[in-house]
Image (tube, rainbow, N blue to C red):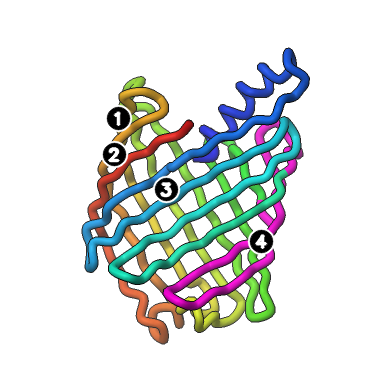
Amino acid sequence: MKKLLISTMLAASLFAEMNDDPLRATLLADRLEWQATDGDPVAWDVAAYAGYDIDKIYFYSEGAVQSDETESENELLYSRAVTPFWDLQGGLEMDTAGSERKVWGVLAIQGLAPYFIDTRIRLKISDEAVGVNFDFEYEALLTQRLILTPRIEMEAYSDDVPALGIGSGFSLLAMGLRLRYEFVREFAPYVGVEYLNGFGDTKKVYGMKEDTRFVAGVRFWF
């Protein structure tokens, strides 16, 4: 996801050189998918930004809705480019789990690591706990239109966050593998599989279960 956002920014930067850094905006739905597991949840992972070459405002939303219950992470961040491929970000995040709400202060770094690995690392701070989230993604071009995307996400927390069902220590591991076909760059359906597991108190106290699920969805941006 980050690679596409960075690519659009670099392309826009070239355009901006001729147009005195105009205001730009992009919306990317990296994942909008049905997941074959209990309750048949619909999940999303969306990012959007508006701004200029160096300074931007980002909005991120990731979550799932199942029956009448929704879990999500929503961030509103100021982002400043510190190198051509890396942004430093800061702002607020609101996590929801059903009727529960939790607000965090967030510091993040986002960009392309060596070997073109999309990387995003967040430090989340609240009055209850400190958390860290690692998100890595890679796009392997099997053909010009067929793309395989492995993704790994990990989370850890200093203390329990009961409202969100999170325990202290290493709490979450998610690994996904998705294969998409780009009819055009802006629109690509995909299928894949995702493995999800909780650890420590997240599993023992709050009941997070190990799960492997088939997924099918669509990726689009404009």
Circle nearer the N terminus (1, 2):
1
Q: Amino acid at mark 3?
A: Arg
Residue depicted at 45% across the width and 73% down the height: 97
Q: Which residue is mark 2?
A: 190
Residue depicted at 40% across the width and 52% down the height: 44
Report the mark closest to the observer, 4 or 1: 4
Q: Amino acid at mark 4?
A: Leu
Q: CA distance from mark 4 to mark 1?
A: 34 Å
Q: Which residue is mark 3?
A: 151
Q: Residues within 10 Å of mark 3 (few under 14, many from 20)?
A: some
Circle nearer the N terminus (4, 3):
4
Residue 92, disc: 4
Tell which residue pokes out farthest to the top in this image: 18
Q: CA distance from mark 4 to mark 3?
A: 24 Å
Q: Amino acid at mark 2?
A: Tyr
Q: CA distance from mark 4 to mark 2?
A: 31 Å
Q: CA distance from mark 1 to mark 2?
A: 6 Å
Circle nearer the N terminus (4, 1):
4
Element type where label 1 sits in the image: strand
Residue depicted at 66% across the width and 61% down the height: 92
Circle nearer the N terminus (1, 3):
3
Residue depicted at 22% across the width and 68% down the height: 38
Q: Main secondary structure of the magenta part?
A: strand
Circle nearer the N terminus (3, 2):
3
Region rendered in magenta: 80-108
Element type where label 4 sits in the image: strand
Report the mark closest to the observer, 4 or 2: 4
Looking at the picture, tell me which residue is in the foreground, 16 or 136: 16
Q: Is residue 104 magenta?
A: yes
